[in-house]
Amino acid sequence: MITAKRKPISEILSMVEGHKNVLLLACDGCVGIYDVGGLKQAEALKLELELAFRSKGKEPPNFTTATVLRQCDTEILKDSISEHVAKIDAVLSLACGVGVQTVAHVFSEAHVYPANNTAFLAMEDKKEGMLREWCMACGNCVLHLTGGICPIARCAKSLLNGPCGGFYQGKCEVDGRTRDCAWVLIFNKLKERGKLDLFTAIRLPKDYRDVKNPRELKREELVLPEAKEAIKILEEVEVKKRPAYSQLMKELSEGRFVVTGELEPVKTTDLTEVIEGAKLLRDYVVAINITDNPTAFAYLNALVPSYIIQEKAGVEAVYQMVTRDRNRLALTADLLAAGALGIKNILALAGDFTTVGDNPQAKKVWDIDSTLLIYLISRMVDEGVDLAGNPIHNPPKFNIGAAANPNADPLEPELYKLLRKQKAGVDFLQTQSMYDIEKIKRFLDECRSIGIKVPILIGITPFKSIKMMEWFVKNVPGVYVPEEMQERLRKARDRGKEAFMEENIIVFGELCKEIRKTTSAAGIHMMAVGMESLVPRILEMAGIGKYRSS
Amino acid sequence: MLGAGKVSEALKAIISPPFTVKYPFVPSPPPISYRGAPEFDEDKCVGCGMCVEHCPSKALEIKSLGEERELIIHYYECLQCSHCNYQCKPIYGIKPTTRYSLIFTDKGEAKLSIVKPSVVVKVKEEACIGCARCEYTCQFKAVKLVKKEGKWVSTIDQEKCKGCGACSAACPAIVIDVPLSPNENVLKEIRDGVSSLSSDKPNILVLHCNWARMVPEELAKEVQGANLKFVNITCSGRLSPIFVLEGFSRGYDAVMILCCPEEECHFEGGVKKAKPLVNVLKAILAEVGITPDRLELVTASNVDPDKYRKALLNMVNKLSSFKEGIKAHAA
């Protein structure tokens, strides 16, 4: 049903001010049932408005109240309130936006105002007293593919191939982990029913053609079968062995232990810092990730520095792309541009939620999710077509990376999602920050046992300060920093800042050494943003040494 | 062998009068505050039937007689436990007598009945929107949505309904009315009080629970310096926002709701339903330019009825400390 929420009295007051006879029109439909637009609310609103007028020292208009069965029905409306029309000059409707407009449409001579803000389509849980958005009227139902749980309405990012990396203990990180992650629910439901193949299947992008508003339906045609195509799923994808186009992929396919770095362009037009950082790293890493609006902060477009570091510093870039900010048109355009500029690696990501960023008011996009971005790039590279199948002249040559979140809780949905990404054509995975060698081993074992064969690079983030470490331990859910490591760094900090940095190098050097020696990891992804100078020393300490000599 | 002492003892017993009373031919006075067979108090019983709900041995019964209802005590089943009396505090529409005898010469005497006007809530079926909010709210499971002539309407079980009015408070379409305190009567009383509003003293509208331990006349005497208008709304769980708004709208300077704490609520949970509504109303009052503190819900336990008087006095004092003065409305 449609829910609504009362507008502030001051706003309503400014609408009805100056009118003599105002009809407060309730609706017995959805909003009446939900206690915001019924006759009682109309009676109460009448008294509230009178009080508000008097407290301002003004004489209130003459209010009358009435209710109709449904304000969204033109005929019912005409029959029920025609008796009032002669006596009034304005209608304050307590219905949803449809009701308000129908009143305005039917009684074109009266001024019509809304008393409520229309909210969303809801299910009601009377026991908890909650209204929950469970449908967004997207016009193309996928509930048969998702265990009866709608990912469009109930996933904050509306992902068709979730979950993203933002759930912990089954809760969505958007709005402070108060709601269940829809995709964890979907996973559990499909697993329960023995339909995990439906989970790992790739749901192809939705057809948004008839979601363009205003939508119209002819009454007699409602039950005719839809002419448009149902949402498609790919249960099995023909896996083509993709050549190693990039240096990074060549090294990985030859089984060499590799290191990748990471640089973050910020809110600037000055690229010197990025170039300097790349120069610092170039001898030690095979490629450098360039972040794309990380944590939803609007920064310099990642494509430009990706190109510049290849040109000026002579080191390969991993161009990160998030699907939060661009629809499939913009993504395709940027991918073609990246191809033209000689970018060889793309890391496909969904991106953090808009509200955690520095422009929290922004509209979220997520036309497609990270899995579908991988699928889009695969089609471009392997088949030379875009998502809709249009041929590309001189298609780009990319190797595709994706992120893995070993800190996911529960881990199983994440693992099956990685399996799905592998199916979509991913070439390598880079994990979030990890600190515990045992956890790294466990994660790699789990990945292998479930059938994930692509090379995995373990993410390492040295600590800038003891504060950063404590923030990490406290605020990044699922991250486990072993007590022993914390203790060593804390003791070092007591001896001074220099000692802390030195200890950092030793601790992470040892960790990298362990990863190389004892695990099946394909390499290390060094996320030492702002601490590029530490990377060479950590790698020396780990005995990994230089990748190339300048 | 019988000893001499025992023989004399036996002889004494033969000639002395009996120790026991010749019941039932001779009445035996019960001890003070003996909890015997219960009786209805004709004046105080409202016929809600909560005693029936609480009777552990099912000795109490409700019979619907259409516009009236009959409450019956079956003495043969009665345990004389006084649960019925306890739950009706402090009104005590049903009271234990000191009578313990269960010997009746006539079968009809084995029960006692009282006929009261029906308290069952009334549904305007033609206006019911079928939202089922009443059905969910009723804790006595007395309300059911039933399909009548193709339309889902709220239907009340004549025996289960206690007339508390929680469904009426929940109804968004004003189709359920409470016979114990009909909407029209409450509003009329609020409006009637307007003629006696004082121009210098603060005017306080007091909406009170039927079972709150207080006597309006006494409170009015004790709380000097204010003009109090008492309106009985049966139970705070039946509070309608319109009562409060109507009060302020008609010129009262404050509205107080006097009721019982949750654990003592006659209908169990009335105030639990009223509290969130009072919070919403406070926010609305702030929006329409009336200090929210002019509305207050006071709960006082049965053992501490003085709290009502203190709260009223406190409100009187508070009113004079508001920056806009005693009066809620500019003259």
Image (cartoon, rainbow, N blue to C red):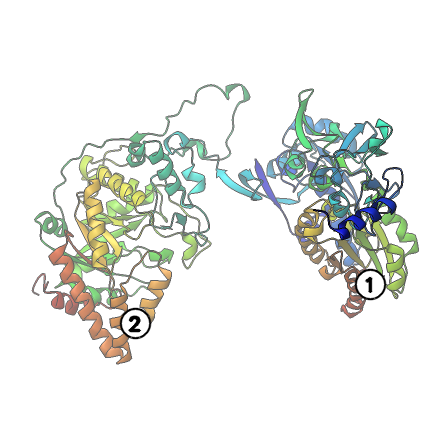
Q: Is residue B285 visible?
A: yes
* Disc ID at residue A465: 2
Image height check: is A481 above or below A140?
Answer: below
Residue at image location 45% in from the left, 48% down from the top? A179
Q: Quadrant of residue A141?
A: top left
- The answer to whether tags 2 and 1 share a subunit is no
Which residue in the rendered view is the most extreme toward the right?
A: B196
Image height check: is B331 above or below B20?
Answer: below
Amino acid under label 2? Ser
* Disc ID at residue B327: 1
Residue at image location 61% in from the left, 35% down from the top? A30
Relative horizontal placement of residue A152, taking residue B34 as reference (left or right): left
Q: Quadrant of the C terminus of chain B?
A: bottom right
Kind of element beneath mark 2: loop
Spatial CA distance of label 2 from label 1 is: 61 Å
Amino acid under label 1? Lys
Chain letter for the residue marked with disc 1 in the picture: B
Q: Residues within 10 Å of mark 2 (few under 14, many from 20)?
A: some
Kind of element beneath mark 1: loop
Image height check: is A436 above or below B149?
Answer: below
Chain letter for the residue marked with disc 2 in the picture: A
Image location (x, y in percent) of residue B224: 88, 65
Q: Nearer the viewer, residue A515 or A298?
A: A515
Image location (x, y in percent) of residue B93: 82, 44
Q: Nearer the viewer, residue B280 or A339?
A: B280
Q: Nearer the viewer, residue B12 or B314?
A: B12
Relative horizontal placement of residue A335, taking residue A245 as reference (left or right): right
